[in-house]
Image (cartoon, rainbow, N blue to C red):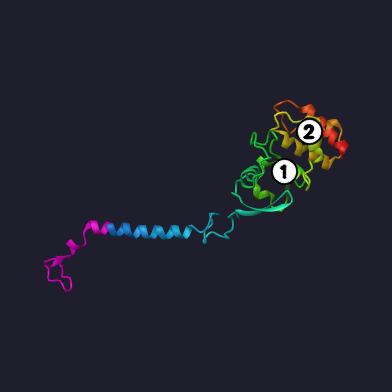
Amino acid sequence: MKPEVFTPLGSGGPAMSVSARVSRRNFIKGIIATGATVASGSMLGTLTGCSGETASTAGIAGTVERLITLNVNGKARRVDVLPQETLAMTLRYKLGLTGTKLGCDRGECGACTILIDDIPTYACSTLSHGVRGRQVTTIEGLQTANGDLHPVQQAFVAELGPQCGYCTPGQVMSAVGLLKANPSPTREEARRAMSGNLCRCGAYDNYLNSVMRAARMS
């Protein structure tokens, strides 16, 4: 049987067989070109914003909103937060509140202590998404509008509480939380309340003296 032939219109050249015209190389080139076009179109549809949401996933049940509002030191702060991001990371690296220190990063040393609704809390063990709608206070939020130090901070200075100073913000926040709940604690009550804050310099008596002085000042 003779092979089917194809003669281009308006061409005076020789006839070309279908098998010669549709070669293996041309076929592969066509497949690659089609795949590249589909892939580029899919990528353009994905890049809808820095939050990682796409038009097809936005609003789907189970997804986590990343751009949230946190109430920090009396101000509403809009911030892009990952679902697994801790409050310590958000405060330090997203909001620039570096007074909150990172020590153990596992809820043991207390260097990252802040107040959530006036309760001392480890920021390294708290997810940022979990504090929406709550009042977060850091060491930066203690001073008054005219720049005066909080009575606890004044007492820490007077009693020479800080040594190297790294744990001091957490110590201050624990003391503030204690005095909000119990304005006149005994020394033993203050010792128990401050027990969640480690001081590698060993200045525990200085910190206790500071708490008791702050209680008298209040």
* Furthest residue in direction bottom, as rendered: 10
Left or right for 25, reference 106: left
Query: Total of numbered circles in the picture?
Result: 2
Disc 2 marks which residue?
A: 157
Label 1 crowd bin: few (<14), some (14–19), many (20+), radius 10 Å: some
Task: Report which quarter residue 19 is drawn in.
Answer: bottom left
At label 2, which amino acid type do we have?
A: Val
Quarter where residue 102 is shown = top right
Q: Residue furthest top?
A: 202
Query: Who's the residue at 19% across and 63% down the image?
Result: 21
Whether residue 195 sits left or right of residue 51 in the image: it is: right
Q: In the figure, residue 38 lies in which quadrant? A: bottom left
Cβ–Cβ under 8 Å for marks 1 and 2: no
Query: Quick one: label 1 or label 2, which is nearer the N terminus?
Result: 1
Q: In percent of the image, x 17 and y 70: which residue is there? A: 8
Q: Which residue is mark 1?
A: 140
Q: Position of residue 110 (x, y in %)?
A: 70, 35
Task: Compute the Cα span from label 1 to label 2.
Answer: 16 Å
Residue at 43% across / 59% down in the picture?
Answer: 42
Q: Identify the amino acid type marked 1.
A: Glu
Residue 216 on image: x %, y %: 88, 36
Q: Secondary structure at mark 2?
A: helix
Residue range (magenta): 1-28
Where residue 170 appears, as percent x and y from the top left, is 72, 37
17 magenta-colored: yes
- Taking the magenta stretch, the answer to whether it contains residue 33 is no
The dot on residue 180 is none
Front residue of 202/190: it is 202
Image position, residue 112 (x, y; %): 69, 38
